């Protein structure tokens, strides 16, 4: 999938990441599935599809919170801040940062 993304074949990269996510979920490896979702969102963000990236990140964030994966929560939340800032949604970015401060406590 990474090679496809680097070569500009974004639809194939997304399809491969989705396939990998499904495989990890079937194997009972939620953290790996969430990491793949992070990569998929990065493909969207890299193309300037920040709203789409935010949707993927929001789902991943909720799943990471349910699974108690604090490191993943922070990582995904930071990516969401970047997306919000790129969309000039500064209040949402600030709100996300405020939530991050709570995770560290």
Image: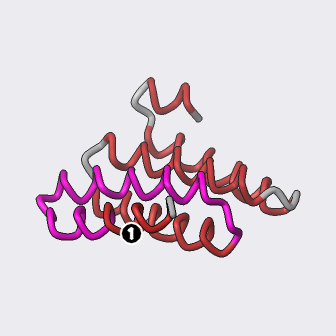
Residue drawn at (78%, 54%), measured in percent from left and top?
A: 24
- Position of 73 relative to 79 (above/below): below
Q: Identify the element where label 1 is drawn.
A: helix
- Position of 103 relative to 12 (above/below): below
Q: Which residues are magenta?
A: 67-96
Q: How many marks?
A: 1
Q: Relative to 57, is 90 on the left or the right?
A: left
In the picture as drawn, the residue positioned furthest to the right comes out as 27
Which quadrant of the view contains residue 2? top right
Which residue is at the front of the view, 27 or 69? 69
The picture places residue 47, in percent across and down from the top left corner, at 30, 43
Residue drawn at (33%, 47%), measured in percent from left and top?
A: 45
Queried whether the magenta region covers residue 77, the answer comes back as: yes
Queried whether the magenta region covers residue 56, the answer comes back as: no
Dominant secondary-structure state across the stretch colored magenta: helix
In the picture as drawn, the residue positioned furthest to the left comes out as 88
Q: Quadrant of the N terminus?
A: top right
- Position of 51 relative to 24 (above/below): below
Which residue is at the front of the view, 91 or 100? 100
Mark 1 crowdedness (10 Å alpha carbons): few <14, some 14-19, many ≥20: few
The residue to which callout 1 is attached is 99
Q: How is the image coloured?
A: secondary structure
């Amino acid at each position: 999938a990474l090679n496809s993304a680097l070569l500009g074949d974004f639809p194939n990269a997304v399809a491969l990441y989705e396939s990998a996510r499904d495989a990890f979920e079937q194997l009972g490896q939620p953290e790996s599935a969430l990491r793949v979702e992070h990569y998929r969102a990065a493909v969207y963000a890299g193309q300037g599809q920040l709203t789409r990236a935010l949707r993927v990140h929001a789902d991943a964030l909720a799943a990471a919170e349910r699974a108690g994966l604090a490191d993943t929560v922070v990582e995904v939340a930071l990516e969401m801040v970047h997306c919000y800032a790129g969309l000039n949604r500064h209040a949402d970015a600030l709100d996300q940062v405020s939530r991050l401060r709570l995770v560290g406590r």
